Image (spheres, rainbow, N blue to C red):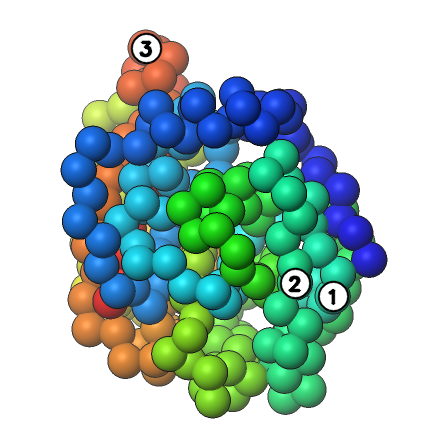
């Protein structure tokens, strides 16, 4: 089962040489790598969010097994949709689905179910793959598309993943794909996002959801970030660190209506 790209040539270059040059140009000159249990990477076009995503991947000591949680922008599929087998095509070659981990997670039963349609046109996981392939080389991954739900369900979904991976937990990185505030003036976006980021650095998913609701923060990664925080704490995480925060205004020069992008590492 091969998953064809949905946004290659749109969100990132289709040509491998052009893509390699772009990622190389976005890579920080000096970036001491660290062991990580989780990360947050944005998923817009590389011209806007690529520097935050690339800087985050460059910061992490590569792992060979990755779980990527992506928000559902299309409305297709299950509440939590896992792509179970095969490989995904990128300009740098195919990346195999980690069928062992995928099967283990599904076998535990719960909210996360096998589902292909949710992934067909969704970009939130796809855009992370070329960057991870560039820095990590050969790795396998489990793609899971996540819908917005109550905290109780996020905890149950995180526990389902944990039960499926706990025997391999030292080998695995959990990535939450997500963007921050959408289409608000730069000062307002930064202020709102700083409130959300504070809770993320404290590994506090409950307070994150509370602030998102109270402050009307239009981040599209509430589900993925919440599940990642719950899951990485189960894996032993103690702290979060911002790698880079930026907005679309940094690329476009238009600060009247921006989207915020966070790159962060959880260890």
**Tags 2 and 1 touching, CB below 8 Å:** yes
Measure the C-alpha gap from mark 3 to mark 1.
42 Å
Q: Position of residue 221 (x, y in %)?
A: 45, 51
Q: Which mark is residue 202?
A: none
Secondary element under disc 3, as helix, strand or loop, is loop
Comparing 204 with 39, the one in front is 39
Q: Position of residue 159 (x, y in %)?
A: 49, 83
Q: Which mark is residue 85?
A: 1
Q: Quadrant of residue 12?
A: top right
**On the rendered image, what quadrant is the N terminus found in?**
bottom right
Disc nearer the start of the sequence (3/2) = 2
Quote the CA–CA distance across marks 3 and 2: 38 Å
Q: Secondary structure at mark 2?
A: loop
Residue 234, quarter of picture: bottom left
Q: Secondary structure at mark 1?
A: loop
At label 3, counting other C-alpha atoms closer than 10 Å, the crowd grade (few under 14, some 14-19, many 20 or more) is few
Residue of label 2: 97
**Marked residue nearer the N-terminal end (2 or 1):** 1
Q: Are marks 3 and 1 in contact (CB under 8 Å)?
A: no
| Quadrant that contains the C terminus | bottom left
Of badges 3 and 2, nearer the viewer stands: 2
- 231 or 37, which lies in front? 37
Q: Residue shown at 47%/89% (left/top)?
A: 167
| As drawn, 209 above or below 182 | below
Which numbered disc covers residue 253?
Answer: 3
The Cα atoms of the two marked residues, 2 and 1, are separated by 5 Å
In the displayed structure, does residue 215 sit left or right of residue 223?
Answer: left
């Amino acid at each position: 089962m091969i998953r064809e790209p949905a946004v290659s040539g749109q969100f990132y270059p289709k040509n491998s040489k052009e893509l390699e040059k772009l990622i190389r140009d976005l890579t920080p000159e000096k970036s001491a790598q660290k062991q990580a249990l989780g990360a947050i990477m944005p998923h817009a076009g590389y011209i806007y969010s690529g520097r935050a995503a690339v800087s985050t991947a460059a910061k992490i000591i590569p792992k060979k097994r990755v779980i990527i949680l992506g928000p559902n922008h299309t409305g297709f599929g299950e509440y939590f949709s896992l792509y179970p087998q095969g490989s995904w095509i990128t300009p740098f070659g195919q990346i195999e689905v980690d069928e062992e981990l995928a099967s283990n997670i599904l076998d535990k039963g719960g909210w996360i179910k096998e589902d292909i349609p949710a992934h067909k046109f969704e970009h939130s996981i796809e855009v992370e793959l070329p960057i991870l392939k560039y820095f990590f080389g050969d790795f396998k991954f489990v793609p899971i598309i996540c819908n917005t739900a109550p905290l109780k369900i996020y905890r149950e979904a995180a526990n389902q993943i944990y039960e499926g991976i706990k025997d391999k937990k030292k080998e695995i990185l959990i990535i939450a794909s997500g963007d921050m505030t959408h289409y608000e003036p730069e000062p307002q976006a930064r202020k709102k996002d700083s409130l959300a980021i504070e809770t993320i650095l404290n590994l506090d998913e409950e307070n994150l959801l509370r602030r998102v609701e109270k402050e009307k923060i239009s981040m599209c990664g509430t589900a993925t970030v919440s599940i990642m925080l719950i899951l990485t704490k189960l894996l032993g995480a103690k702290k979060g660190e911002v790698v880079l925060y930026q907005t679309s205004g940094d690329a476009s020069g238009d600060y009247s209506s921006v989207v915020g992008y966070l790159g962060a590492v959880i260890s």
